[in-house]
Image: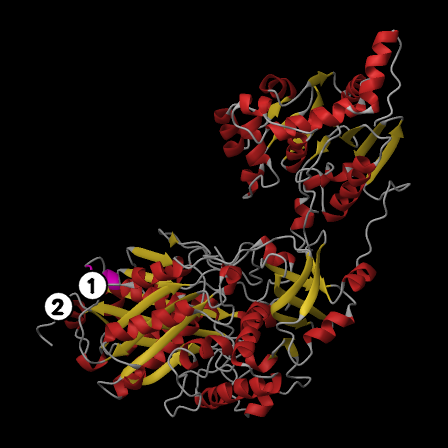
Amino acid sequence: MNTIDPRTPVIIGVGQHLDAYGKEGYEALSAVDLAGRAAAAAVADSGVSPDAVSVAIDTVGGIRQFETSTPGAPAPLGRSNNFPRSVAARIGAAPRRAILEVGGGQSSQHLVTELAGSIAAGESRVALVFGSEAISTARALAKSEDRPDFSESIGGDLEDRGFGLKGMMSMEASAHGLVDAPSQYALVENARRARLGLDRKAYDAKIGELFAPFTAVAARNPYAAAPTERSAEELVTPTEANRPIADPYNRYVVARDQVNQGAAVLLASVEAARELGVPEDRWVFIHGHSDARERDLMDRQDLSGSPAARLATDQALEMAGVTADDISTFDFYSCFPVPVFNVAVDGLGLDPKDERGLTLTGGLPFFGGAGNNYSMHGIAETVERARQAPGTFGFVGANGGVCSKYSVGIYSTTPREWQLDRSAQIQAIIDAQEPVAQISRADGWATVETYTVKHDREGRRTGIVIGRLEATGERFVAMGVDGDDDILALLASDEPIGARVWVVSAAPGNRVTTTPERALELLPPRPKGLRESYEHVLVARDGHVLEVTINRPEARNALFPAAHEELAEIFDAFFADHELWVAILTGAGDQAFCAGNDLVYSASGKPNYVPASGFGGLTSRRGMNKPVIVAVNGFAMGGGFEIALASHLVVADETAQFALSEVKVGLVAGAGGVIRLPRAIPPKIANELILTGRRIGAQEAKDLGIVSRVAPAGQALTAARELATEITVNSPTSVRISLEVMAEAQQHADPLDAVTARTGLLDELMASEDAMEGMSAFAQKRAPQWQNR
């Protein structure tokens, strides 16, 4: 071993800690303290002076807790402002570099691999990686009168890599109930069952056979959160304790997140390990490693698994120069059955009853789903086993997202110099795969590609389907309609996958049922025409003019789904009404026309969406062939400004202010602002307004061409009425066709191409009664009598 490169990374210590709630010795430790205990154990595991090791640590890497993995996640007992440095301080370390890794179950293995590479490159000599979860304590004590305060503040630099949520969250998924891991994994699981041609009972048996041995391992593990051995039948049989979560999952086979666990891994260069005096029988080498990222779920050609995870596994084994037959221990990430099936069974061809076992810890449902840090425990167990059987090989597979990110490590006490990362080779293969064509708003007959049924604690069920439209082959996601027993019965049938269903695009999202007739029963179309009254909007007809007032002055006329729905319905009626020629939209009160999206409502966690016609029923509306005038009094912020940009004419009083202020609250003007503003005003000025969120007044907006007319304070609506009158004295047919010709002309970059393009609109105009009436009235020197036809 004296000839090995002195910068070769080795694992010299591992540690774990359990603080079991309600059990003897329970201490109610914070996440920092749990990780600190594990880190101290890893330092001690090196077999040399803990003080000497702690002083030598130059890099620490922390794994995110669930409470720091998503924006706005609650920390009911408080948390550290710098988790890695807080943990380092617990063991007397003062590292020059501190990392807070991105979220995901792959992060433990990935960070161990990365920091091993940093050691091999000479960028680090001794590195400590750790993580923990104290969810059980947080939930148990959050409402306690004497609850502990885990808040702490510590100085020092922090390399915070962010949440790592790209591809993990989408508005489309959220709108259709795919906000929880069980539902998303269930979609993959059911797709795999159908691919294998197994019925429900047979596949349930496979799940039970897979996980029953895991429970036996957990039952023997002193660090397990749920050390109870269960039979295969017990795991898949629904009971009050084992309630259904998301078909085909019951509670026993999903990751257990209520844990208090910590784990840590200590790495060093061979040179540093020798200087510290770490015995060589403590050294464990990384022989193979690989990382891969799968395409986003809806982009995947095959929904039944993850080729990326299998490619990463094959590459790591090849790098190590071994096959699955050469591996003595395995620890597969097991938040749900399908990640294990995907790699261990489908990829490596292992039998769930393989005498080597598929887990060293007991797996996430039984050992505990210690958040993103689970695989740190898997690595710790693998290192321990490698030391007990020198020369053998151990495999760790860590999974993140929805079978989205996979990180692999192959471990052995046999000396091996560091191998450079080759992950880019397989990532190029994955990225070259063509994504599936998708549609956001789906309508028509379709085929079920995969599905699940979610169950809440009160027994309510919600069906979720990913399907393909028969007409186009485009993929969509849809939910069942509340109270639709027909679709629930179909999804509970022997084989829903491949079944024919009917999908309709509703305002909240796509809704799936069994037939068009059933869809009409459940989702009757809006009544045509204007109602007498609305809850959030005022409507008044004045001859050929429709006045629409957003009536939420207490919220500065900010909009939320119910108000959007009313506005969409009103403008549907306006554009369909032959006798209405011009619409005026304004806001109640003198403070604001519309302050945009109701952020208070958005923060409530309630479903937030806009109808197909867009923000305020206008920003995504096609065929706006009648004039819409926006009368701005006060603020037109965010979505309010976007409504103004989508209108034909804007009248503002002198107090009005406009801004695309989304960047100030971490959002984007996605309702057309970033598209329309650069087309409406000079691009560089548009860039400034979009990127700074700067407000502009009415006169500046007029100078830029956004506003047509500026009125005295409080007179915007009066001025808008005057403008509407100027329009309605003209031929409504001419006005309509003028708008349609201008819209058609937008398709041509060259004005001459637009002028000379063939259009049937002018023929329609010349054949209209209004054209004939206009010429006759002119010749007869009388006022025309327009018929709008």
Q: Amino acid at mark 1?
A: Ala
**Relative height, residue 262 to residue 430 (above, below):** below
Q: Residues within 10 Å of mark 1 (few under 14, many from 20)?
A: many
- The stretch of residues the image draws in magenta is 117-121
| Apparent side of residue 741 relative to residue 149 in the rendered image (left or right) | right
Q: Residue 333, can we see it?
A: no
SS at circle 2: loop
SS at circle 1: helix
Disc 2 target residue: 5
Residue 34 is drawn in which quadrant? bottom left
- Magenta stretch secondary structure, dominant: helix
Disc 1 target residue: 120
Residue 449: in magenta span: no
Please name the residue shown 37% across and 64% down the image: 292
Q: Amino acid at mark 2?
A: Asp
**Relative height, residue 606 to residue 254 (above, below):** above
Please name the residue shown 27% across and 66% down the image: 54
